[in-house]
């Protein structure tokens, strides 16, 4: 299992991460996504799998001296993960609901993730370009008519409110123009 957002999912589902991955053969956990560490990941699985992964990592030059400094950042992220990710999840949901209300019917928003916006009736390239210059969230065009708002743990409720105000401004300008 690609666990890039495993901790986010655990908080959103009110479920321990171990329960989410219990039927997986192997799992990775990224510390640099929702947990906020600058780099780092760990992998887990059966003993033979982890031993081979360790060997391959070393063979490919993946060993590091002084990795403890980076591990400390991961520990900080794990220590307050539940509280921080809960706030992040609430802000993402607030953003998704607000964007859905603002953009309907020319855009639809995936309310489960709070990040994917499907555009219908507006030029997606122009919408993306204008939003990139104005929004607290990073916005990227991921498909012909799909935008993705990318969030991180430091985006506050106030930032979310400001981003929605900017989305409203851009959508109004595009609808009129």
Image (spheres, rainbow, N blue to C red):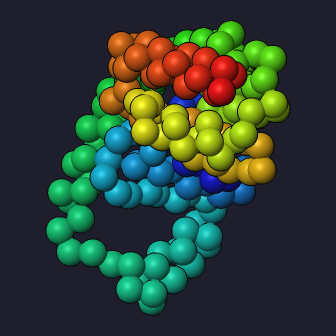
* Residue at x-position 56% and y-position 36%: 149
- The residue that appears at 61% across and 59% down in the rendered structure is 45
| Labels in figure, total | 0
- Residue at 41% from the left image edge and 48% from the top image edge: 31
For residue 26, above or below residue 174: below
Whether residue 83 is visible to the viewer of this picture, yes or no, is: no
The residue at the far bottom in this view is 59
> In front: 52, or 39?
39
In this view, 87 is above or below 114: above
User: Relative to the observer, which residue lies in front, 74 or 93?
Assistant: 93
Depth check, front residue: 168 or 41 = 168
Tell me: 176 left or right of 73. right
Question: With respect to residue 81, does 62 lie above or below?
Answer: below
Q: Is residue 74 visible?
A: yes
Image quadrant in which the C terminus is located? top right
**Residue 98 in the image, given as x and y percentages of width and height:** 60, 12
Residue 1 picture location, percent across and down: 67, 52
**Residue 36: quarter of image:** top left
Image-quadrant location for residue 104: top right
Residue 79: quadrant of the picture: top left
């Amino acid at each position: 299992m690609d666990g890039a957002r495993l901790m986010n999912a655990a908080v959103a589902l009110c479920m321990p991460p171990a329960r989410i991955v219990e039927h997986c053969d192997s799992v990775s956990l990224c510390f640099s996504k929702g947990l906020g560490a600058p780099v780092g990941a760990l992998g887990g699985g059966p003993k033979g799998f982890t031993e081979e992964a360790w060997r391959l990592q070393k063979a490919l030059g993946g060993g590091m001296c002084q990795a403890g400094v980076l591990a400390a950042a991961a520990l900080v992220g794990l220590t307050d993960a539940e509280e921080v990710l809960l706030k992040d999840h609430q802000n993402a949901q607030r953003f998704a609901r607000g964007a859905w209300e603002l953009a309907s019917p020319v855009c639809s928003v995936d309310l489960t993730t709070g990040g994917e916006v499907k555009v219908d009736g507006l030029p997606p390239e122009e919408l993306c370009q204008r939003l990139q210059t104005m929004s607290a969230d990073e916005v990227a065009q991921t498909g012909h008519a799909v935008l993705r708002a990318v969030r991180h743990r430091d985006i506050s409720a106030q930032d979310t409110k400001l981003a929605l105000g900017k989305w409203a401004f851009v959508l109004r300008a595009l609808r009129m123009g």
